[in-house]
Amino acid sequence: MHDSILTYAKSRYLWISVALLAGSLAAYIWHDPGGLPNGGTWLGYTLGTIGALLIVWLMFFGIRKRRYLNNVGTLRGWLSAHIYLGTCLILIVLLHAGFQLGWNIHTLAFLLMLIVIFSGFFGVYVYLRYPNLMTRNRESATREAMLEEVNEIDLNALALADGIDPKIHAVVLRSIENTKLGGGVWTQLRARDGSDLALDSLHKAIAAREKKQDMKTTEMPTMFAMVDFLAGRATDKQGDAMRKLIDLISRKKGLATKVARDMQYQAMMEIWLYIHVPLSFALLAALIAHIVSSFFYW
């Protein structure tokens, strides 16, 4: 059975985190500070040191996941520990401060920590949900293969439209230009396909041609009208080409929709890091300010 990052090694880091929290809570209940609990007691300093070391260690995960040859634990193990020990920080820091918060640099550090942790929760949700969605969406095809097929369809559609009518060619070309796939994270989130424009125009053009053909048949005697109608349908190469073009663009629309959805899933897996990583460094700076102010100005 395949373990997820939350159940890695029989939930080893969940139990380590539970033990750490249980020990911290037991020490907090047992400790008698002789007044209101605060970060200036021996227990406050101890829990504060544990919290600070955890924050620094958690930030090393960004370095560890880029060192593929590192033999100190597996990447999945580090990530599992990162999640559970990071969550521990909420209670440990509150116990460290004796649940006393105010409008100061210390509370700023706590708030930054909460934002980083909850953005991490969103990251866990994304990494547990979106890879499965991407696999189902691709249907065993790679994104590169789908993009190659989209490009091939675009070329074939342009070649086919070129032999139909300049206006149809312009419509197909505009739909290709309106298809936006790839690029950076923000572009991926806004990925779109312009096939609907071409399909609507082609359906209208075919409807107009058929209406025109039907109007011609009503203006002629019945027998001659039927012969003319059948002959016109049999030799209507332009109409057949337009129908083939519709089939091509419909196929392109389905593929482009899959590619756009795949890119949007990928972007969702990355965009939260634009909050998580910068705020982690802001938290580190606030932590240093908290420590310096606690030792030198209190």
Image (spheres, rainbow, N blue to C red):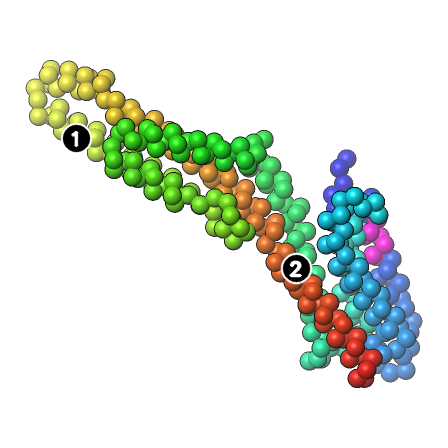
Residue 152 against residue 188 in the figure, above or below: above
**Type of amino acid at the residue the image marks with label 1:** Lys
Q: Residue at x 88, y 78 (%)?
A: 41
Q: Quadrant of the N terminus?
A: top right
Q: Is residue 219 left or right of residue 49?
A: left
**Residue indicated by mark 2:** 276
Q: Which mark is residue 144?
A: none
Residue 26, horizontal then vertical, whole percent = 89, 66
**Type of amino acid at the residue the image marks with label 2:** His
- Tag 1 and tag 2, C-beta contact below 8 Å: no
Q: Main secondary structure of the magenta part?
A: helix
**Residue indicated by mark 1:** 212
Q: Quadrant of the C terminus?
A: bottom right
Q: Residue at x 47, y 44 (%)?
A: 181
Give whichever of discs 1 and 2 has the lower sequence position.
1
**Looking at the rendering, which quadrant does residue 224 occupy?**
top left
**Which secondary structure, mark 2?**
helix
**Looking at the rendering, which quadrant does residue 174 occupy?**
top left
Question: Dot 2, how many residues are within 10 Å of its Cα: few (below 14), some (14-19), or many (20+)?
Answer: some
Q: Residue at x 85, y 69 (%)?
A: 49
